[in-house]
Amino acid sequence: MGSGKTSAGRLISEALGVPLRDSDPFLRATYGGSAAEIAARDGVDVLHAREAEHVLAELGDGEPKVITAASSSVEDPRVRAALDAAFVVWLDAPDEVLAERMRSGDHRPAFGPAAMRARREPYFREVADLRCDVSAMPPDAVAAAVLRAIRSPAPDQDGPAPRD
């Protein structure tokens, strides 16, 4: 949702030495358009199905990577189930910040953050291992927080903190 996911994802993938797989290039390469173009041409439901397809394909090959996924993908129960084995970072911010950031690129469809939050927040709470407020954290701070979380589990845990 215009939250700096590609910038933070790039930093994380470089630090871990694994590939970055971003939904925006996937949509362009596979379906010949940006998210906004696909939504306008084929409809929002088709766009969301294609965004979920991206996440499922990337998780399905078993290779370690950083996936910068469209927020709509959490609405798909198959994606939520597949994310169970992944470390999931929720890049969040107040609605007004997300609305401003969504206007920053013509590749983004014109969706309202409040409506998206109402639908998606319960799913993000279900799948997220870490929540970062990108209104207060630039991409380098998000990357640092993610790297700390995946490299330094809490003393009483074998891995990242449990989800809500």
Image: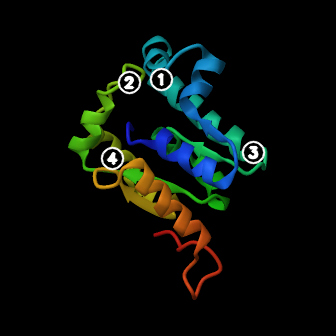
> Residue at 32% of width from left, 25% of height from top?
110
Q: CA distance from mark 3 to mark 4?
A: 27 Å
As helix, strand or loop, the secondary structure at mark 3 comes to helix
- Going by the numbered disc 3, the residue's amino acid type is Gly
- The 10 Å Cα crowd at callout 2, few under 14, some 14 to 19, many 20 or more, is some
Q: Quadrant of the C terminus?
A: bottom left
- Going by the numbered disc 4, the residue's amino acid type is Arg
Residue for badge 1:
35
Q: CA distance from mark 4 to mark 2?
A: 15 Å
As helix, strand or loop, the secondary structure at mark 4 comes to helix
Return the mark for residue 117: 4
Give the mark, 2 or 3, whose residue is nearer the N terminus: 3
Q: Please say if 160 is above or below 88.
A: below
Q: CA distance from mark 2 to mark 3?
A: 27 Å
Q: Are marks 1 and 2 in contact (CB under 8 Å)?
A: yes
> Residue at 62% of width from left, 27% of height from top?
26
- Going by the numbered disc 1, the residue's amino acid type is Ala
Return the mark for residue 109: 2
Give the mark, 1 or 2, whose residue is nearer the N terminus: 1
Q: Quadrant of the N terminus?
A: top left
Residue 31 picture location, percent across and down: 61, 17
Q: CA distance from mark 1 to mark 2?
A: 6 Å
